[in-house]
Amino acid sequence: MDDRPGCRRLRDNAAPLGRDIDNAHPVLLMRALVTHGTAYAYDVEVARADFIEACALARELDDRWRLSQILGWRSLAGMFVGDLGAMHAASEGRQLAEAIGDASNARLCRLALATAQTDRGEVRLATASLREILADATAAHDVFCRSVALVNLTFALAWQGDVDSAQTAADEFFDDRSKLGGLGDRVGYSATGLIRLMRGDAAGAREAYEAALQRTPLTPATVITYSVSALPSLACGDLTAARRRADDVVAASKDVSLVAALATRARVAIAQGEFEQAGDDALEALAVAAESHGYMTVPEAFECLAYLAADASNHREASAPSRHGRFRAAADRCCALPNIRGGTSASACGYPKPIGRERLPNCLG
């Protein structure tokens, strides 16, 4: 989202302007609501209210084309900030777009649904969906959907650990990124940071994330691409920088991005010897994951809890038994939740392994 002062004034005034003349121009009000909701997508409650009202107006007018467009924008806004609650709009929007022959909007909704699969940790399903969308968008000369599919595919492949394929997708994206403007630079360099992190190149990952931040600052609207950006500093041994970044990311995060931010800060806290902070963060990450269905970095939280439980067992201080039981019990309860790991289909979904000690040697001591 563009955060320049002029753009902030435009989006802040969009909905009130539309309401001033809503009796005469309901279509203008719909557009104003969509503009406002998209700009404030990171504020889930505000965005949801705007899009619900816009959809209601379109339904009252029996305007299926505009309803399809509104659902598409709702899906797109939710996709960029990791709002999995917007995916019901993506499902309805896809069905409606296909029914009325709006192939472009159907692709947008499919993109949102595929990205939600990534956020839920279903990376193999996501990569298959994204490859199909990429092929369709390329054949239709849909530049925007092609570029978004490429960058989302890059993230999904990187999380799956297929760094070579992720790099290939990233290279294609960078060839196209001029068509996305500032958004392309931000997500492109963040994707490169994740690829290098998964490859074990901590210094290169840190450089890529810093390049992304120079182009787009860390805000609630951009935080989802920076959710693990503290890990390269941690792996490089710069605990002060890692903790500062981890704290900043947690402060800006909600829902799906908060799961990753908390799991990341738990790793930093372990390296700093702040075990209570690490345990609190890991437990909160699991609680947020269960509520938001953002399971991608749940393995990281589990690994932190396992380390903390083992550490408590290996030390004989008075608090160790209760701490060990607390961490083990929490992990056992979360493992029992059917949505985490998808039951017996977990391997088919391709949930990623945690970023282990061999990749981040300084994270867990």
Image: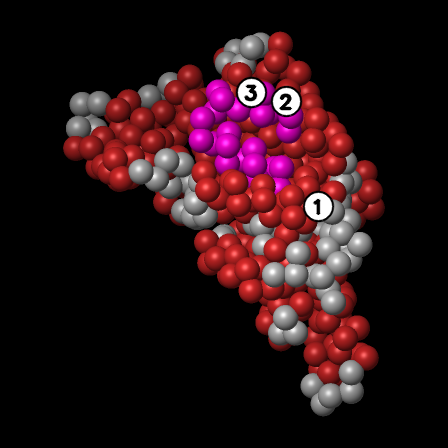
Residue 329 appears anywhere in the view: no
| Label 1: which secondary element | loop
Q: Are marks 2 and 3 in contact (CB under 8 Å)?
A: yes
The N terminus sits in image quarter? top left
Kindly identify which residue carries mark 1.
Answer: 201
Q: Relative to 92, is 29 on the left or the right?
A: left
Numbered range of the magenta stretch: 170-193
The C terminus sits in image quarter? bottom right
How far is disc 1 from disc 2 in space, using C-alphas? 21 Å
How far is disc 2 from disc 3 in space, using C-alphas? 7 Å
Residue 178 appears anywhere in the view: yes
- At which x and y percent is residue 129? 68, 27
Q: Relative to 308, is 19 on the left or the right?
A: left
Kindly identify which residue carries mark 3.
Answer: 176
Visual colour scheme = secondary structure
Inspect the image, locate mark 3, and give the three-letter code of the amino acid beneath it.
Asp
Kindly identify which residue carries mark 2.
Answer: 172
Q: Residues within 10 Å of mark 1 (few under 14, many from 20)?
A: some
Q: Are marks 1 and 2 in contact (CB under 8 Å)?
A: no
Q: Main secondary structure of the magenta part?
A: helix
| Label 3: which secondary element | helix
The answer to whether residue 66 is above or below residue 295 is above
How far is disc 3 from disc 1 in space, using C-alphas? 25 Å
